[in-house]
């Protein structure tokens, strides 16, 4: 019985499991695409407290803060509901589109000062997150942290990328990241933090305050620097930080900190006549009563290590120009220029002296404010007659023309003197050139004579050496001939002696042979027998009874005769 029921029970369990899996797959499955996320909404559970918009506990009813990312998720559709919302994308930018300008023109500098300048290109962005639900922050606190659960702007920012953000809890606002290109630094100002007390700034020198509040036609009103300045802030304090940002990309919360771009290097500030209606020349009277109007261009800059102090004291670059460089430039021009005569501004030497004094005095004053002055260049000078007013005065061309003509006459006289001196020098040069040519010819002639003498002496010595060599060769040849004669004589005598000795030896040999054979006749017979060759003799047989027939006997008798021993010869 159990064996029959057990397979049936297992089958029922498997079928039930498959049915539940199928129901769960189709009814409880949540598919989230790759560019979406899911906000969960609990349909039943504990009611939210009064004023609370989002559930902070899993068992609470309502919208939950946690979201589900792309993928497959499973939730009970009876207790849960969900809503697809797009992911928040913070662009990373495209560096290939960046157009970084390392040297700004006048219009771009104006936009930079007003905070409206932007580099072209797709730069990275950041997301400033504001929490819309949660507990109220303490009074006066605007920035909160994500972990605090309070309403307000989060200190943390969203960096470039894709983020799962619950739109019912957070609001994201995109801002450009701080991009500091080469040639710039960023001065950071904390917008929140501990408040620092104001400090009394050093008061300007009396000569710097002269005519600071005055205004002249065509020039901007001068502004005196504030007597109070806030010190540089440290971390956690409100104000301008001492450390500046070097070139790079920074993800800074613009609600928390402000970054001011400062162009490094020298800039130009001009007080010149741009048009008939925009005349910014600096006017002052000379010590002779003439009204002088000069156009000046100042080349100035800020050292990066003092950029924070400058922005902290003056706010921006416009403050530097309006409160320091512009007023001091006009004040110094009036103070120094009133000690010169009108003609001094037309003469070159006096004008350069005025420009040098102006530059040095402006450098001295601006150095105390950490502003570097490279040069104050006087570009335009206009002299007005003393009878004319400042506003209606006309340039005094007669004075300039007279002074110029006098200088032209002086320069012409100097030119003539220089031409005369040049002619004298040319004559002296011509004379010296002729003397050089004469000396060159003289030296060449003397050189040729010396060369001829040296060549003749060399030929003479060569002939003497050749004659001496020939004499020595003849002497040596004579000695060689005598030696050859002696050699021939010795060789002839030696050959004679050798022949004599050889003949004597041969004679002695023959004598010994003769003595050996006993007598000369025996030696001769020996010699005949030794040299006798029978092959060369032919014998003819003629028969018996004749001389020729007995020749064989004769031959035997002759041989016997020859072989018989000789008789003793008696000596007489």
Image: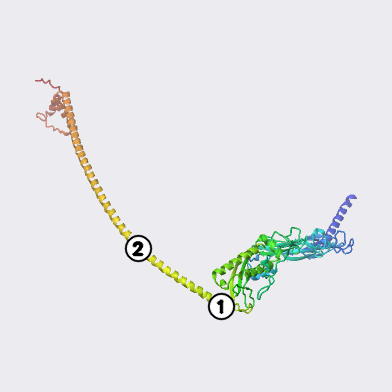
The quarter of the picture where the C terminus appears is top left
- Where residue 102 is drawn, which disc sits there? none
> How many badges with numbers are in the image?
2
* Label 1 neighbour load within 10 Å: few <14, some 14-19, many 20+: few
Residue 145: % across, % down: 79, 59
Q: Are marks 2 and 1 in contact (CB under 8 Å)?
A: no
Helix, strand or loop for disc 2: helix
At 51% from the left and 73% from the top, the residue drawn is 407
Please tell me whether residue 556 is drawn above or below residue 480 in the rendered image.
Answer: above
In this picture the colour scheme is rainbow
| Foreground of the two, 568 or 17 | 17
Residue 293: % across, % down: 61, 74
Q: Quadrant of residue 473?
A: top left
Q: From the viewer's perspective, is the residue at label 2 or at label 1 nearer? A: 1
Chain-order first, disc 2 or disc 1: 1
* Label 2 neighbour load within 10 Å: few <14, some 14-19, many 20+: few
Q: Quadrant of residue 198?
A: bottom right
Mark 2, residue position: 437
Please tell me whether residue 72 is drawn above or below residue 398 in the rendered image.
Answer: above
| Foreground of the two, 2 or 380 | 380
Residue 281: % across, % down: 62, 73
At 35% from the left and 63% from the top, the residue drawn is 435
| Foreground of the two, 178 or 565 | 178
| Foreground of the two, 550 or 206 | 206
Residue 424 shows up from this direction: yes
Helix, strand or loop for disc 1: helix
- Where residue 397 is drawn, which disc sits there? 1
Q: From the viewer's perspective, is 120 left or right of 483?
A: right
* The residue positioned farthest toward the front in the image shown: 288
Residue 418: % across, % down: 45, 69
């Amino acid at each position: 019985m159990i064996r029959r029921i057990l397979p049936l029970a297992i089958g029922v369990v498997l079928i039930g499991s498959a049915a539940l899996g199928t129901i769960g797959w189709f009814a409880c499955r949540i598919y989230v695409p790759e560019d979406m996320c899911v906000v969960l909404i609990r349909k039943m559970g504990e009611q939210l407290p009064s004023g609370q918009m989002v559930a902070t506990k899993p068992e609470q009813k309502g919208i939950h803060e946690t979201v589900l990312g792309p993928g497959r998720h499973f939730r009970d559709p009876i207790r849960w509901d969900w809503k697809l919302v797009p992911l928040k994308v913070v662009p990373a930018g495209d560096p290939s589109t960046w157009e970084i300008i390392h040297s700004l023109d006048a219009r771009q500098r104006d936009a930079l000062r007003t905070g409206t300048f932007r580099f072209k290109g797709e730069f990275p962005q950041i997301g400033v997150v504001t929490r819309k639900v949660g507990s109220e922050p303490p009074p006066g606190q605007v920035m909160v942290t994500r972990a605090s659960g309070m309403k307000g702007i989060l200190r943390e920012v969203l960096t470039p990328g894709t983020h799962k953000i619950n739109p019912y809890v957070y609001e994201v606002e995109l801002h450009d990241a701080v991009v500091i290109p080469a040639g710039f630094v960023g001065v950071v100002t904390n917008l929140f933090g501990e408040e620092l007390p104001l400090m009394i700034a050093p008061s300007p020198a009396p000569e710097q305050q002269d005519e600071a509040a005055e205004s002249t036609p065509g020039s901007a009103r001068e502004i005196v620097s504030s007597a109070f300045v806030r010190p540089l802030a440290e971390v956690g304090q409100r104000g301008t930080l001492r450390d500046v940002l070097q070139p790079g990309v920074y993800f800074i919360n613009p609600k928390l900190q402000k970054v001011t771009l400062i162009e490094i290097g020298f800039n130009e500030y001009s007080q010149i006549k741009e048009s008939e209606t925009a005349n910014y020349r600096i006017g002052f009277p000379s010590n002779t009563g003439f009204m002088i109007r000069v156009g000046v261009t100042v080349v100035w800059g800020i050292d990066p290590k003092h950029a924070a102090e400058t922005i902290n004291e003056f706010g921006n670059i416009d403050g530097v120009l309006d409160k320091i460089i512009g007023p001091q430039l006009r004040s110094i021009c009036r103070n120094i220029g009133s000690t010169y005569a009108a003609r001094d501004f037309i003469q070159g030497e006096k004008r350069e002296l005025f420009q040098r004094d102006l530059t040095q005095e402006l450098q001295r004053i601006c150095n105390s404010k950490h502003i570097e002055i490279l040069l104050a260049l006087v570009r335009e000078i206009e002299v007005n007659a003393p009878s004319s007013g400042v506003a209606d005065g006309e340039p005094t061309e007669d004075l300039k023309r007279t002074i110029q003509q006098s200088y032209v006459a002086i320069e012409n006289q100097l030119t003539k003197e220089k031409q005369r001196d040049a002619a004298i020098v040319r004559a002296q040069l011509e004379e010296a050139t002729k003397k050089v040519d004469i000396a060159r010819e003289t030296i060449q002639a003397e050189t040729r004579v010396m060369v001829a003498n040296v060549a003749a002496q060399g030929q003479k010595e060569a002939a003497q050496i050749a004659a001496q060599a020939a004499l020595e060769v003849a002497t040596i040849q004579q000695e060689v001939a005598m030696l050859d004669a002696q050699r021939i004589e010795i060789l002839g005598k030696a050959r004679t002696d050798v022949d004599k000795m050889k003949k004597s030896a041969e004679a002695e040999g023959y004598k010994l042979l003769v003595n050996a054979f006993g007598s000369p006749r025996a030696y001769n017979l020996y010699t005949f027998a030794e040299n006798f060759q029978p092959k060369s003799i032919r014998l003819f047989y003629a028969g018996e009874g004749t001389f020729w027939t007995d020749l064989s006997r004769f031959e035997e008798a002759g041989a016997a005769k020859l072989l018989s021993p000789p008789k003793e010869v008696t000596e007489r």
